[in-house]
Image (spheres, rainbow, N blue to C red):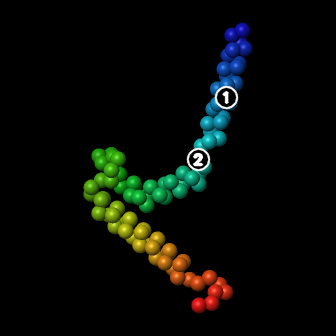
Amino acid sequence: MKKIAFAALSLAVLVASSSVFAEGKTRAQVYQELIEAQQNGLDYVTDTSYPDVNPIFAQQVAHNKEALAAKAAAASHAASSTAPAGSVN
């Protein structure tokens, strides 16, 4: 009786653990999250400043965010200013 219960329990644990791994993130998702974290300045968080950005790097993080916003604005402006092919003005 104990062998059957142990086998059933082992099977349940095996099925549950395989479904957990199936719901994990892909490498591409983790890589994208890493890029977003770096763009948000999270690579300037130190042991002494966690969870905030270290005050020493605050100005640099603000500058990086402004540059990123300007780059995004320029890209969206360039995309919106180009007329679609075949349009008549």
- Could you tell me which residue is drawn at 67 percent across and 86 percent down? 86
Q: Earlier in the sequence, mark 1 or mark 2?
A: 1
- For badge 1, the amino acid type reads Leu
Task: Let me know if residue 46 appears in the view.
Answer: no
- Vertical position of residue 78 compared to residue 60: above or below: below
Disc 1 residue crowd, few under 14, some 14–19, many 20+, Cα 10 Å: few
- Could you tell me which residue is drawn at 43 percent across and 58 percent down? 38
Pointer 2: what residue? 25
Secondary element at tag 2 = loop
**Residue 47: image tag:** none
Q: Measured from the top left, where is residue 10 in percent x and y?
A: 67, 22
Using the numbered discs, state the Cα–Cα distance from disc 1 to disc 2 in whole angstroms. 20 Å
The C terminus lies in quadrant: bottom right
- For badge 2, the amino acid type reads Lys
Q: Left or right? Give the position of 50 relative to 75.
A: left
- Vertical position of residue 64 compared to residue 46: above or below: below
Pointer 1: what residue? 14
